[in-house]
Image: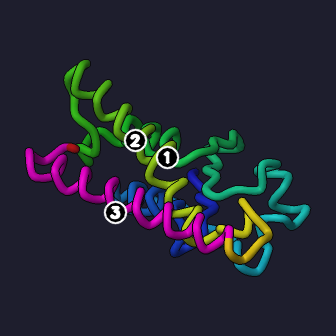
Amino acid sequence: MLTLYYCPGLFSLGSHITIEETGAPYNEKIINVMKGEHMAPEYLKINPRHKVPALDIDGTILLENAAIMADVAKKFPVAKLKPEGEIDEARWNSIMTWLADTLHPSFTRIFRSDKFASDPAAQTAIKESGKKEAWENLSEIDTMLSKGPWM
């Protein structure tokens, strides 16, 4: 059985959407990051990195959105959540890694500038640079989506 630990409104929603798209049965455990539930001793046993998402696959824990989404797509091929050709799958993995490594950090700078600086003026500058980069990334996604069913 699958159990997904995630927080609505955060990037862990991608893993939630992926599992939902398969139609497979799963349990969901909402971890309210805004209330600090990701730091609770019970959750730290699941993910010592204190991040969401985490996917429990029959007692084995898988972390990170890109890995979870790829694993779920492979487990449920009938949902057609990934391309089938070798090079297309490699490109799909490249895009998912880019989303995690580039898009997500730009939003982190917008919404969690306090993680990068304690000075309010510096936080404002960090937020602005995050907004600029996020907009560029979202524009790139629009271009990718205009080319076909797969980014």
Q: With respect to residue 13, does 145 lie above or below?
A: above
Does residue 48 appear anywhere in the picture? Answer: yes
Circle 2: residue type: Met
Label 3 crowding class (10 Å Cα cut-off): few <14, some 14-19, many 20+? some
Question: Of tags 3 and 2, which is closer to the observer?
Answer: 3
Which label's residue is closer to the chain start, 3 or 1? 1
Label 2 crowding class (10 Å Cα cut-off): few <14, some 14-19, many 20+? some
SS type, badge 2: helix
Q: Is residue 128 magenta?
A: yes
Q: Residue at x 20, y 23 (%)?
A: 85
Q: Tell me the distance, in whole angstroms, between the alpha carbons under discs 3 and 1.
A: 16 Å
Query: Residue reaching furthest left?
Result: 147
Q: With respect to residue 80, does 17 lie above or below?
A: below
- Numbered badge on residue 135: 3
User: Badges 3 and 2: C-beta atoms under 8 Å apart?
Assistant: no
Query: Between 116 and 22, which is closer to the camera in this rendering?
Result: 116
Task: Provide the residue designation for mark 2.
Answer: 96
Q: Tell me the distance, in whole angstroms, between the alpha carbons under discs 3 and 2.
A: 18 Å
Residue 54 is situated, as x and y percent measured from the top left of the image, at: 64, 52
User: Badges 1 and 2: C-beta atoms under 8 Å apart?
Assistant: yes
Q: Say whether residue 13 is left or right of residue 73.
A: right
SS type, badge 3: helix
Query: Residue reaching furthest bottom?
Result: 35
Circle 1: residue type: Ala
- Numbered badge on residue 33: none
Q: Tell me the distance, in whole angstroms, between the alpha carbons under discs 1 and 2.
A: 6 Å
Circle 3: residue type: Trp
Residue 115 is situated, as x and y percent measured from the top left of the image, at: 73, 63
Q: Residue at x 63, y 41 (%)?
A: 62
Query: Between 128 and 102, which is closer to the camera in this rendering?
Result: 128
- Numbered badge on residue 100: 1
